[in-house]
Image (cartoon, rainbow, N blue to C red):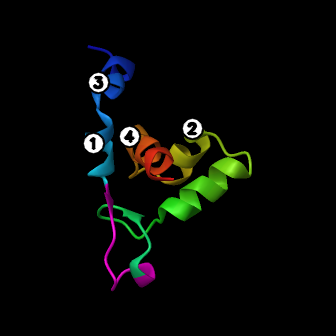
């Protein structure tokens, strides 16, 4: 099974499990689980013209589904 096929199978609910909010991390802003990277930051990168590939290259610990989760949450 190709990676893109696998990514398509992830349902919206599953994507949102990748996002968490904790009042002790970034003032409670939604972040990608296990990181201090906020949904807002990812959305700002995308809005400024960064591509998913750009973000994944700059933040190799992220997965494509993390970015999709940010878009779903945003």
- Separation of residues labelled 4 and 2 (CA atoms): 12 Å
Instruction: Kindly indicate whether the residue at mark 4 contacts the one at mark 1 (C-beta within 8 angstroms).
Output: no
Where is residue 48 drawn, in percent x and y? 74, 52
- Separation of residues labelled 3 and 2 (CA atoms): 20 Å
Residue 22 lies in the magenta-colored region: yes
Residue where numbered disc 1 is placed: 13
- Separation of residues labelled 1 and 3 (CA atoms): 11 Å
Which mark sits nearer the N-terminus, 4 or 2? 2
Instruction: Kindly indicate whether the residue at mark 3 contacts the one at mark 4 (C-beta within 8 angstroms).
Output: no
Q: Helix, strand or loop at disc 3?
A: helix
Question: At x 49% / y 60%, what residue is drawn?
Answer: 39
Residue 66 lies in the magenta-colored region: no
Provide the residue span drawn in magenta: 19-27
Q: Dot 2, how many residues are within 10 Å of its Cα: few (below 14), some (14-19), or many (20+)?
A: few
Q: Helix, strand or loop at disc 2?
A: helix
Residue where numbered disc 2 is placed: 53
């Amino acid at each position: 099974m190709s990676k893109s096929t696998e990514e398509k199978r992830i349902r919206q609910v599953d994507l949102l499990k990748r996002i968490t909010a904790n009042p002790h991390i970034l003032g409670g802003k939604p972040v990608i689980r296990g990181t201090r990277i906020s949904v807002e930051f990812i959305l700002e990168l995308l809005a400024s013209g960064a591509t998913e590939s750009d973000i994944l290259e700059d933040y190799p610990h992220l997965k494509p589904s993390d970015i999709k989760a940010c878009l779903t949450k945003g």
